[in-house]
Image: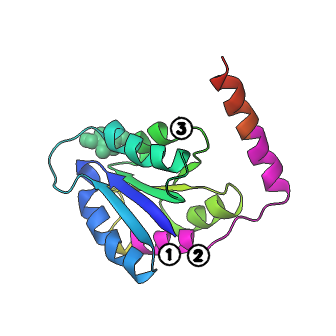
Amino acid sequence: MKIAIGCDHAGVELKNGILPVLKELSIIYEDVGPYKEISVDYPDFGEKVSEMVSKGEVERGILICGTGIGMSIVANKFPGVRAALCHEEYSAEMSRLHNDANILVLPGRIIGKEKAAAIVKAWFSTSFEGGRHQKRLDKIRTIEERLICR
Ligand code: RB5
C-alpha cells in the first residue's frame, strides 16, 4: 500500500516517530513534510496529503497537527476523503470498520510515540466492514456531489 504523510510544526516529532512503524508494516510512504520544526500553516500540508488521497494518487494518508483538529477540518473538505481524528486504538479500528476512513489524523501534542504506533497498527490492520455501512458512505458521497454542483 502507498500512502502520503504530512504534518505541521506541531506534528514533526510524532511524524518522525511513526515513519519506522510504517516501514515495519511494509507501507510505502511519501513524506510531504515539513521536515523541521519551523512554523508552518497546517492547511498547506493538509491540502497536499488530502489532494493526493482525493485524486487516488495514494490509497490513504496520515496527517498530524497539535490537536489534530485543524488537519481534520482541512482534510474533510476534499471529495472522497474520510478523515478520522483518533486518540486511541478503538476509534482507529472503528474508523476503518464503519467509516472506511482513508486519512488518519493524529494529535501531535496530545499523544506520544507509543500510543501513535499502536493507533497506526490498529488502523492499517483493520478492513472496512461494508454492508449497512456502505449505504451510509454512499449517502455521504451524495451530499458531496450535491455540494460540488452548487
Ligand atoms: C499550531 O500551533 C496548532 O494550531 C496546530 O498544530 C493545530 O493544533 C491546529 O488545529
Q: Which residue is depicted at the point 46% across and 48% down?
A: 52
Q: Is residue 96 left or right of residue 57?
A: right
**First in residue order: circle 3 vs circle 1:** 3
Image coordinates for residue 7, horizontal then vertical, percent: 32, 51
Colour pattern of the rendering: rainbow
Q: Find residue 29 and report its horizontal and vertical position in percent.
A: 39, 66
Relative to residue 118, is residue 31 depicted above or below? above
Name the residue carrying label 1.
Answer: 121
Q: Crowding at label 1, few (<14), some or many (≥20) Cα neighbours within 10 Å?
A: some
The residue that disc 2 covers is: 125
Residue in view at x 66 percent, y 57 percent:
100
Q: Which residues are magenta?
A: 116-139
Q: Residue at x 37, y 48 (%)?
A: 67
Picture quarter containing residue 5?
bottom left
Q: Amino acid at mark 1?
A: Lys
Disc 2 secondary structure class: loop
- The CA distance from mark 3 to mark 1 is 25 Å
Disc 2 marks a residue whose amino acid type is Ser
Task: Return the residue at label 3.
Answer: 78
Say whether marks 2 and 1 touch (CB < 8 Å).
yes
Kindly report the distance in space between the C-alpha atoms of the residues bearing marks 3 and 2: 24 Å
